[in-house]
Image: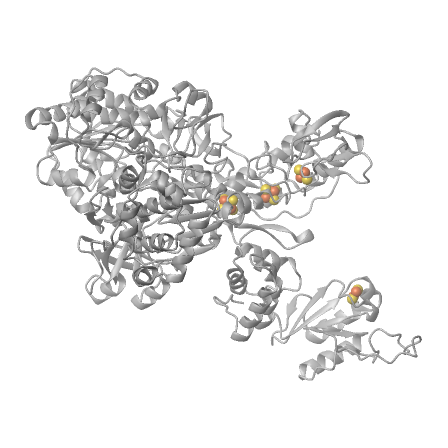
Amino acid sequence: MSEPENFAFTPENLERAKARIAKYPAGRQASAVLALLDLAQRQNGGWLSRAAMDYVAHMLGMAPIRVYEAGTFYTMFHLRPVGRHLLQACTTTPCWLRGSSDVVAACERKLGIGLGETTADGLFTLIEVECLGACVNAPILQVNDDYYEDLDGPATEALIDALKKGEPPPPGSVIGRRGSEPVGGATTLHEVAAPATGEEA
Amino acid sequence: MTDPIRFFLDGAEVEARPGETIWQVANRQGIEIPHLCWLPKPGYRADGNCRACMVEIEGERVLAASCIRKPSAGMRVKTASERARFSRQMVFELLLADQPRRDAAHDPGSRFWQWADRLDLSESRFPRHGAPAPDRSHPAIAVHLDACIECTLCVRACREVQVNDVIGMKGRGYHEKIVFDFDDPMGRSTCVACGECVQACPTGALMPASLVDVNGLYAHAPDREVDSVCPYCGVGCQLTYKIREDRIVAVAGREGPSNQGRLCVKGRYGFDYVHHPDRLTEPLIRKEGVAKGNVAIDPGNPYTHFRKASWEEALDAAAAGLKRIRDAKGPKALAGFGSAKGSNEEAYLFQKLVRTGFGSNNVDHCTRLCHASSVAALMEGIGSGAVTAPFTAAMEAEVIIVIGARPTQNHPVAATFFKEAAKQGKTLIVMDPRGQALARHATLMLRFKPGRDVALLNALLYTIIKEGLFDKQYVAAHTQDFEKLAEHIRDYPPEKMAAICGIDAETLRHVARTYARARAAIIFWGMGISQHVHGTDNARCLIALALITGQIGRRGTGLHPLRGQNNVQGASDAGLIPMLYPDYQSVEDPGVRQKFEALWGKSLDPKRGLTVVEIMDAVHRGEITGMVIMGENPAMSDPDVAHARAALAQLEHLVVQDIFLTETAKYADVVLPASAWPEKDGTVSNTNRQVQMGRAALPLPGNARQDLWIIEEIARRIGLPWSYGHPRAVFAEMKEAMPSLNGITWERLLRESSVTYPCDSETSAGHEIVFADGFPTPSGRGRLVPAAIVPPAEEPDGEYPFVLTTGRQLEHWHTGAITRRAQVLDEIEPEATASFAPSELRRLGVAAGERVRVSTRRGAIELKARADSGVAPGMVFIPFCYAEAAANLLTNPQLDPFGKIPEYKYCAARVEPVAAKAAAE
Ligand code: SF4
Ligand code: SF4
Ligand code: FES
Ligand code: FES
């Protein structure tokens, strides 16, 4: 892995960055640091290089160390290159009780990598994360920005196959559950119109 | 102001001053509460993270951290309740679990261990977790994070106190770690080695490398301490030497008025030069038949060219030569260079030696090469060459202008105040052709075209006058010649000046308005203003800015030329100037002269003497044939130094008094081994007009002698019956000649370490801010002197297309005679480099690190190229401290007509890659 020497926002991202900065009062540009780091990470193939952090620091008039601190504090920022599909397996208690070990094992078996590793073809990186805030549909595997829910071993393997083929299934529950309603379908509030699903993210 | 708060501390009713924490009140009451992450020193904010200072507050469920908790009225605090004590004990026991064992501690005397002892703790019941590896990548600082308790004092030291922003906290929770930049090895980080973090760390995790051995164990424990002042720059930081067996092993910052405990890399880690094997320890006399031009001498072994002599013989030879020339050719055939690195007493005695012993005013020193033009303009404008306010006044200003100065390198501790002020939201405007570290903190950075200062400043004056932003009342009451200035300035509208100085008209107007409208604004400048043929004009413009806006004489306002050498203020005050006696009294004023004739008991030369560069010219003309040079190095520092060296070689008789065989001493007939700063008692005056006491801490090496003794011995041998004996006696005489020393006595300085002048009485503090009400000029008014645009003396052309500018680096001092012999400093910056814009290097086809040849009409040197995006394309910057590639072989000796200062900051140069040439041959 070699650290790139330079980073600069694309013209579109530069516009986005300016819009983010403009949300804060004068002299408080530093507040936009997380938004800009996120933009930079997306532009940079899912990880933040030092050059990217330096660029953001310069843009916000911050000492680089302040940006490094934010970048290393938040687990959502990745400081080394990641595969095209970043698999984040939640292994916190609710997911674990609902079989996250099987999800992780399936990933490891299928991809031949352990936690924290990237496949040789650069397609997948597997990491373990704390609660993703979707315990009600545990266990969860986050793939880039999407949540796949209600997984088990075989479903995880199928998901990986689909990703490999470049045909990612629609995000959400893999057992067809809508939102967080009970597995067997809604049991209350029948008189209310059914909500639209999964459009919020 | 809020009212004091009354509350109960361990049952007793006490009062908290506004803003005081429980810890501070307790401390005032003599109640000890342990503390680790809280450092009761100026500039340190309480953070409340370590929980070593917990106290119980009645009615509150949880304990409170006393270092950060402020009392409220009627609160009942128990500092020693069982619960509080138990909690604090537990904190220490938990922390202890991860500490290296006491017998393996990096600092067994650290604040952590001191508290552990007081709490009677030496073992912990908790398991230890893995220890991070040591980081010994830095030459001066040892990092052993196994002792780190993550109290973040070092982070606050680096970020909030020195504002260097190197240290941070990486990660979170259990994985948290103190890091330098992006977890780089400290030695490769952007650390500037100010050592503030080391001084703050309570555990020994950060240590001076000199106090730990290769295994990280505490070593070389100091056996005594001496308080003194730093010998490097005009900031005049107070410090404490830590000494073991008569060697300085470490240095700590002391809370002086100018540094508040802070130091920079030079003051903190630049001391081992004193113990360098090159120190001169025996008087030397040039061997028979060794030609002066032959300077291939190893400073560590002068015996190839010189022979050892007794003091008696050496002093006799030194004095006999001077006497011979004086008596044969007259007083004007002799000259002397004193030094801004010595004490006030030495400077005073040296100029007295020349004036009363040689019989002329041919005495000068390096102020000529740094701020002579500023002083000329200040004397003419406001009747005083010193600053009108200390640099700490920046904290009270609303707008701070720094022009032609690079304080983060040259006045690093002053820079900490500027950075802090900027962080607090003050407007900091930096103007410099080269980019610099201060720019990141600046509200505005104006990178104008080199040598175009007057155009830039006149545009500001134009805007202020044209838009009526000047202070009419102040102008009417306290200035003269305003109409002349207003008339003159008409030709300098921003639109027209923009093309010349490279800053657009709108920005120029904005800066002018910002400065003029500020409630309080202050101007700092350095050699970028003074070292030009138009240096005096540059300073005149700055003075005019302050005068027409009334930004002077009040808190947070003023004019402050940042003085370079530790004692350039003092040496100038003491009269090491060819046209002025002590306290800037003119040698050509008969009344003044009579006074000094009476004081010194000698008739004095009524004509001003020659300046540094003029003296060298007079040597070339054969008019001056004998010189004494004390602690100066013109063979490195003069412009077009080949010319100066030829002059030195031509002298019939040269006596050099120094601590090393400098490039200058290599031309000497007699070399007298002198005292280094930590070896002598004496006072120095810093840029803030603070007279400070330096104390001898070390014995002299070998046969070296006190400079004062040497001057006196020479004096006696040329017919002056002196017997001062101690600097105290010299200081007493100085007080008779210098009203500026009113209220300041040797004893007072011994007691208080620092007194600001002017000072009304022995019991009152000095005046930090002067000229609230008029100026010490004949009219009592500040004089406005218009300045026209004078181009630099040598502009780039087809043959020499680059602009060469010279200056200093953070790590090296002046000609490098001292700092290149300080191991840490030389390790950080070991060799000469020429800095270019990266684009310029690409155009030249040179990679950073490859060698280039830089030549001017006066000479050529070869050195490594360095990429520096701060340097504008078309420019090259070379520091002048490297003897092996002396920048001053290249510089232009053209002088400013008033200050007689050479144009070090601008000349035409050519640059060629060396490798390519070598390959072609
Ligand atoms: S290195 Fe020292 S000052 Fe810094 S956090 Fe650790 S213990 Fe505190
Ligand atoms: S030595 Fe100074 S610059 Fe370096 S890390 Fe410590 S505080 Fe920061
Ligand atoms: S525990 Fe997995 S989403 Fe909350
Ligand atoms: S000293 Fe109070 S919390 Fe650290």
Quadrant where the C terminus of chain A sits is bottom right
Q: Is residue B550 above or below residue B585?
A: below
Q: Is residue B848 above or below residue B347?
A: below
Q: Nearer the viewer, residue B587 or B214?
A: B587
Q: Is residue B516 above or below residue B8?
A: below
Q: How is the image coloured?
A: one colour
Instruction: Give the quadrant of ligand 4.
Output: top right
Q: Nearer the viewer, residue B690 or B249?
A: B690
Q: Nearer the viewer, residue A6 or B487?
A: B487
Q: Which residue does the image show at 74% across and 79% down from the upper left?
A: A159
Task: Tell me, yes or no, if residue A114 can be seen here.
Answer: no
Q: Is residue A34 above or below residue A173?
A: above
Residue B208, image x, y percentages:
50, 38
Quadrant where the N terminus of chain A sits is bottom right
Task: Tell me, yes or no, if residue B604 can be seen here.
Answer: yes
Residue A181, image x, y percentages:
87, 74
**Rendering quarter of residue B345:** top left
Answer left or right for B910 relative to B334.
right
Q: Which residue does the image show at 28% across and 16% down from the upper left?
A: B724
Answer left or right for A200 relative to B718.
right
Residue B203, image x, y percentages:
60, 38
